[in-house]
Amino acid sequence: GGGRGKPVQNLQSYLIMPFQRLVRYRMLIDRLLSCTDVPSEMRMLEEGLKHVTELVERCNATKHKMDGRRNLRRIEKSLGRKGVSCASLKCLIQGRLTFMQE
């Protein structure tokens, strides 16, 4: 067969690879900055580092937001209800949840 010897990866593994590359690019640019003393090259590398860092930070923030939504859906399901709401996903605290009826 055509796939022998190659490790099988799930979809999540393939989706995370571009983000891992972004982090590696940031490390590479940082390393290049430490190896150059040419002002024009340093400016370009610093600008590139700034943009890659901003992109990595936005990706991380989006992932945290998605994790919060996933946790909220899990809580909704465990309560057997829909519409558990929170003004901000940041107020979601993981731990034991007790539901009391009046």
Image (cartoon, rainbow, N blue to C red):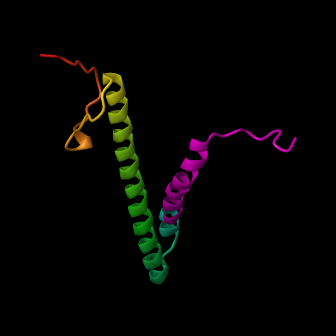
Quarter of the N terminus within the rendering = top right
Q: Is residue 16 left or right of residue 55?
A: right
Name which quarter of the figure residue 71 lies in. top left
In this view, which residue lies farthest toward the left? 102
In this view, which residue lies farthest toward the bottom? 40
Q: Is residue 5 left or right of residue 51?
A: right
Magenta stretch bounds: 1-29
Quarter of the C terminus within the rendering = top left
Nearer the observer, 102 or 32:
102
Query: Is 92 covered by the magenta stretch?
Result: no
Total tally of numbered discs in the picture: 0
Nearer the observer, 72 or 38:
72
**Could you tell me which residue is drawn at 42 percent across and 74 percent down?**
47
**Could you tell me which residue is drawn at 32 percent across and 28 percent down?**
75
**Could you tell me which residue is drawn at 46 percent across and 83 percent down?**
40
* Rendered location of residue 95, percent (x, y): 29, 24
**Up/down of 69 relative to 60, above or below:** above
Query: Is 7 covered by the magenta stretch?
Result: yes
* Rendered location of residue 76, percent (x, y): 32, 29
Name which quarter of the figure residue 58 lies in. bottom left
Nearer the observer, 47 or 97:
97
**Up/down of 57 relative to 35, above or below:** above
* Rendered location of residue 80, percent (x, y): 33, 24
Most common SS among magenta residues: helix
* Rendered location of residue 41, percent (x, y): 49, 79
Nearer the observer, 81 or 65:
81
Q: Is residue 4 left or right of residue 7?
A: right
**Up/down of 80 relative to 29, above or below:** above
